[in-house]
Amino acid sequence: ETGVTQTPRHLVMGMTNKKSLKCEQHLGHNAMYWYKQSAKKPLELMFVYSLEERVENNSVPSRFSPECPNSSHLFLHLHTLQPEDSALYLCASSQDSVSYEQYFGPGTRLTVT
Amino acid sequence: KQEVTQIPAALSVPEGENLVLNCSFTDSAIYNLQWFRQDPGKGLTSLLLIQSSQREQTSGRLNASLDKSSGRSTLYIAASQPGDSATYLCAVEGETSGSRLTFGEGTQLTVNP
């Protein structure tokens, strides 16, 4: 069991729905990340937060909206998604945002219908 | 732009065999290289982190080496077991990419009893 938890583990949503993914880290880390893993593609970094400030937005469409209320929690708010957004969404954390080992959560398997 | 390539894409070996997974990257200006394991539909488990100043790291039956100048890393697994079956991912953190990890597509390993 890792120190990074994600809920829900599975989510099916329609294109007009609004949902949120939640990530919580129990490691005392200062940086948190959202990644997207699509079938047969490498993991893609979406967002990076360091000390609750967004430090990187990797050209992600605005239908994905991250929120980091404190250094232990990270959310990804979803609205009007497309079927191609179906993927495994992984959260990670690290001690700091540069040159530290990243620890991953189990992921949320998202299906957009 | 950093590119990470992993060879082979898939590998099937009998139990007990020693094996080597390969990772190459195009930009040698890196902070570190990290090897991960991913079980089907699950998150990533960090196996080994090699800082750019290091040549290798060992953990149990795993040994990872790094040749930064040539842009190569290998993950050596000794005395493989069926429980080692998973996808192994290599990722590098570039000096110019901030906190971004660039991932390879992975090597899918099957160890047959």
Image (cartoon, rainbow, N blue to C red):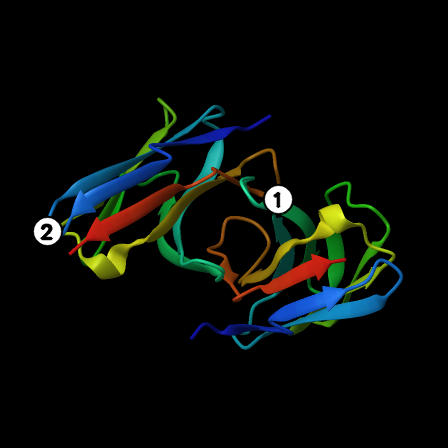
Q: Taking the image as drawn, is residue A6 in sight?
A: yes
Please report the residue visible at 19 percent of the width from the left and 44 percent of the height from the top. B13
Q: Is residue B11 left or right of residue A16?
A: left
Q: Are marks 1 and 2 in contact (CB under 8 Å)?
A: no
Q: Which residue is mark 2?
A: B16
- Three-letter amino acid code of the residue under disc 1: Glu
Q: Is residue A45 left or right of residue B113?
A: right
Please report the residue visible at 61 percent of the width from the left and 37 percent of the height from the top. B97
Q: Badge 2 local density, few (<14 within 10 Å), some, or many (20+)?
A: some
In the rendering, at what x and y percent does residue A37 appear? 59, 49
In the rendering, at what x and y percent does residue B60 appear? 19, 59
Q: Which residue is mark 1?
A: A44
User: Image height check: is A106 above or below B84?
Assistant: below
- Three-letter amino acid code of the residue under disc 2: Gly
Q: Which mark is residue A70?
A: none
Q: How many marks?
A: 2
